[in-house]
């Protein structure tokens, strides 16, 4: 990721590297951060295993399980996206997984058979590169108005504490917003949420 003229750039699987800009009411003064490395096969394998474990603990069915674990299809709305975040002082970067899936099991009254699944998970590695989840969110809803998937955008030090924060966009039923998570001793916490809009 690089900061050029206020723009944010991020390494995202199967997506454009230019995500636009972010505005604040204070000077960001971003620190120079080295380009995020490409996701390795081993990192992907570990993250998929961690996500699978959570989905199994939530008793997710076979069809949504497959849809949430399969690599994201740029032409569809389902699939798992794994992003690289800042590594800080560690040789291993933070991994961010997001996925969503919607289904209608009924033909006559689809609104009565709606199922939406959404997850957002963050994993960090130990000294030898073994990852564990340090943040996880999973939601299964039967109401389309409650379906609110996230998309990772970039990382940057928003609160000026010397550590990179994770910036996401979220979208729901006719609305959208931006939010940032920051790392503390107790885990990842919501720093700010705002600039929402909709119909």
Image: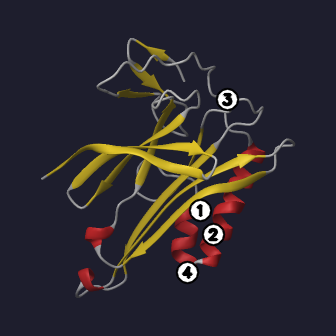
Quarter location, residue 117: bottom left
What is the spatial separation of the Cα atoms under label 1 and label 4, in whole angstroms? 12 Å
Horizontal side of 126 relative to 50 (left or right) equals right
Q: In whole angstroms, how far apart are the C-alphas of marks 2 and 1?
A: 11 Å
Q: Which of marks 4 and 3 is in front?
A: 3
Label located before the other in sequence (3 or 2): 3
Q: Is mark 3 on a helix, strand or loop?
A: loop
Classify mark 1: residues with Cα within 10 Å, few (<14), some (14-19) or many (20+). many
Quadrant housing residue 76: bottom left
Q: Residues within 10 Å of mark 3 (few under 14, many from 20)?
A: some
From the image, state whether disc 4 or disc 2 is nearer to you: 2
Cα distance between the residues tagged 1 and 3: 22 Å
**Which residue corresponds to mark 3?**
37
Q: Is 76 drawn above or below residue 10 in the view shown? A: below
Instruction: Estimate the x, y position of residue 26 in percent, counting from the top left.
Output: 33, 22
CA separation in Å, label 3 and label 2? 26 Å
How many angstroms separate mark 4 from mark 3 (CA)?
A: 34 Å
Q: Looking at the rendered structure, which numbered label has been put on residue 54?
A: 2
Left or right of 7, for residue 183:
right
Q: Mark 1 points at which residue?
A: 69
**Residue for badge 4:** 61
Decide which of tag 4 and tag 2 comes sooner along the chain: 2
Residue 76 visible here: no
Looking at the image, residue 19 sits to the left or right of residue 35; the answer is left
Residue 104 location (% of width, % of height): 34, 78
State if disc 4 and disc 1 touch (CB < 8 Å): no
Residue drawn at x 65%, y 41% as measured from the top left: 94
- For image coordinates 73% across by 29% down, the residue present is 89
Marks 4 and 2 sit apart, C-alpha to C-alpha, by 12 Å
Q: Quadrant of the N terminus?
A: top right
Mark 1 or mark 3: whose residue is earlier in sequence: 3
Instruction: Tell me what residue is drawn at x 35 percent, y 60 percent.
Output: 148
């Amino acid at each position: 990721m690089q900061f050029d003229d206020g723009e944010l750039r991020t390494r995202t699987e199967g997506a454009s590297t230019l995500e636009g800009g972010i505005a604040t009411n204070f000077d960001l003064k971003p620190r120079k951060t080295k380009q995020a490395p490409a996701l390795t096969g081993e990192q992907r394998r570990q993250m998929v295993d961690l996500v699978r474990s959570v989905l199994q603990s939530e008793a997710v069915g076979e069809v949504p399980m497959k849809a949430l674990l399969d690599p994201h299809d740029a032409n569809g709305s389902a699939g798992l996206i794994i992003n690289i975040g800042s590594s800080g002082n560690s040789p291993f970067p933070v991994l961010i997984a997001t996925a969503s899936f919607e289904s209608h099991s009924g033909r006559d009254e689809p609104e009565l058979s709606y199922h939406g699944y959404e997850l957002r998970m963050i994993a960090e590695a130990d000294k030898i590169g073994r990852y564990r989840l340090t943040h996880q969110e999973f939601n299964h809803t039967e109401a389309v108005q409650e379906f609110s998937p996230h998309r990772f955008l970039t990382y940057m030090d928003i609160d000026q504490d010397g550590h990179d924060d994770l910036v996401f966009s979220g979208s729901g039923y006719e609305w959208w917003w931006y939010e940032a998570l920051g790392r503390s001793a107790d885990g990842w916490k919501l720093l700010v949420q705002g600039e929402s809009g909709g119909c």
